Image (cartoon, rainbow, N blue to C red):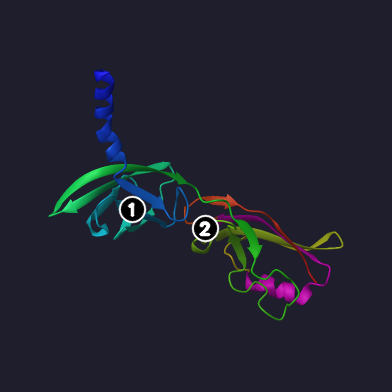
Amino acid sequence: MRFIIFLILSALPSIMHAQKATATATKMNVFYIGVQNPLTIVVENHDCSEVVVKTSNGTITGSECNYSFLSYDTISNYTYLYIGVQKDSIVNWVDTIYFRFKRLPAPIATLSNPKLNDFDTDLYSQRGIIPITPKFDFDGDVYFIVTNYSFKISRNDSIIFKVSGIAGNHMLPKNETYLKNNCKNGDVVLIYDILAVGPDGIRRKLNEIKQVVE
């Protein structure tokens, strides 16, 4: 019995240590590469102004219990947050918390103008081809740059126009002019071989976009 009590008492410091600090990612339960990951960090019985945080991987900024973590590391899949309390210029490190990294989800290629029926205006207004990540909490904060795409126009199962290796989210002016001057109702526009790079630096091949001119 004494031995059991001794083991319980010996474990108490570790249990108390693990409960001292709490780090909560406010958007997801993991960190995503290449985006600012907001998180809240609190230490029991201590004011937010006393909390000090550093990380083993990436950078962490913020204060008063509200922080943001950022890393572009595509090799590692985790980081440790070291959390302490500072008083009179002395830091007492009270806890270490583990967080995993994940790559951003693959986006879906869409058009800013979903209907190809008005060739008197900018066909691909705004950003042209827009890769989006629906149902992802960071969607509004994540921007993918299209580095390559090709497109072709078919009429009655015959290709009437084709161009490859276009860089950028927007359509080239000469190609847009061709569409305005030559497309007819029923023509099929296919945008394919779309490659895009997100803030995590990873290049992805996206879905094709097929539209019928109305």
User: Which quadrant is the N terminus positioned in?
Assistant: top left
Dot 2 falls on a residue whose secondary structure is loop
Q: Do the residues under discs 2 and 1 have CB atoms within 8 angstroms?
A: no
Please report the bounds of the magenta region as a residue range.
172-196
Spatial CA distance of label 2 from label 1 is 20 Å
Q: Position of residue 20 (x, y in %)?
A: 29, 45
> Looking at this view, is 146 or 198 the one in front?
198
Q: Which residue is mark 2?
A: 137
Residue 188 or residue 159, whichever sits in front: 188
Badge 2: few (under 14), some or many (20 or more) residues near its Cα, within 10 Å? few
Query: Left or right: 163 with respect to 203?
Result: right
Disc 1 crowd rating (10 Å Cα; few below 14, some 14-19, many 20+) is: many
The quarter holding residue 175 reads bottom right
From the viewer's perspective, tell me whether residue 148 is left or right of residue 89: right
Callout 1 amino acid: Ile
**The C terminus lies in which quarter of the figure?**
bottom right
Q: Position of residue 206 (x, y in %)?
A: 63, 53
